[in-house]
Amino acid sequence: MKKRVGLDVDVLSCQREELYAYKGAVGTKGGGFVELGGGSAQIVNKTAALSFPIGCVRARDEFSACGLLELGEQLACWVRKHVISADCFFNEARWTGAGGTITTLAALFAGLSHYDGAVVNNISLTQADLQALLEELALMGEERRCHPLLKERHDIIIYAAYILLELMRIFRINTLAASDADGMEGYIKEKLLEL
């Protein structure tokens, strides 16, 4: 890259990636942070960062043969098998969540038909909200493919919601504030500080 276009490439370690995501989404507000991706999930606060191989694409690949009735229980067991809870997270009063599936769930909860980051940034989800969303998504069936918000995530959104719900239970997260900002914003903030 340097030779071809004159740009330096900064390869991020897992720890730096988690730190930038935390800084981007949480900023100076503090508290706990959840990021859910296709291959993994991260739980971060100011003193610790945990990463687990429980992404929604992995879940789809592992449990696509399960019917909806058994899926919730199967995914809960799977998440608990991989997740190690940590006392340092249990006293966080504020929690923020980022990543495409979390922000999509927040947009669905807000009743949006098209994504709007400004609206998503003002949405908080409780465990009861997620449970209601899961029921709504299950009732949609194949119509999920046609929903404008779900075009790219129609096949993984239910897995994501179940994983997130179980993480909220494990880490005693009562309310999760959605954030449209993530690691890119955190990285930019860090670079601006260096300048």
Image (spheres, rainbow, N blue to C red):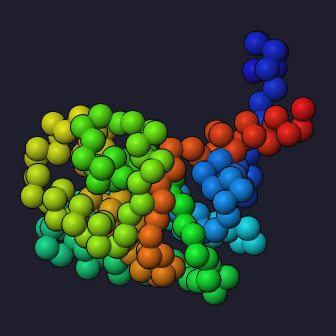
Could you tell me which residue is drawn at 24 percent across and 47 percent down?
111
Vertical placement of 192 versus 123: above or below?
Answer: above
Could you tell me which residue is drawn at 16 percent across and 59 percent down?
136
Residue furthest right as drawn: 195
Vertical placement of 96 versus 50: above or below?
Answer: above
Q: Quadrant of residue 150?
A: top left
Question: Residue 46: percent from the left, percent from the top?
Answer: 73, 67
Q: Quadrant of the C terminus?
A: top right
Depth check: 174 or 163 in front? Answer: 174
The answer to whether 112 appears left or right of 138 in the picture is: right
Question: Residue 110: percent from the left, percent from the top?
Answer: 30, 50
Q: Quadrant of the N terminus?
A: top right
The answer to whether 138 appears left or right of 33 in the picture is: left
Question: Residue 44: percent from the left, percent from the top?
Answer: 64, 66
Q: Is residue 18 visible?
A: no
Vertical placement of 72 versus 189: above or below?
Answer: below
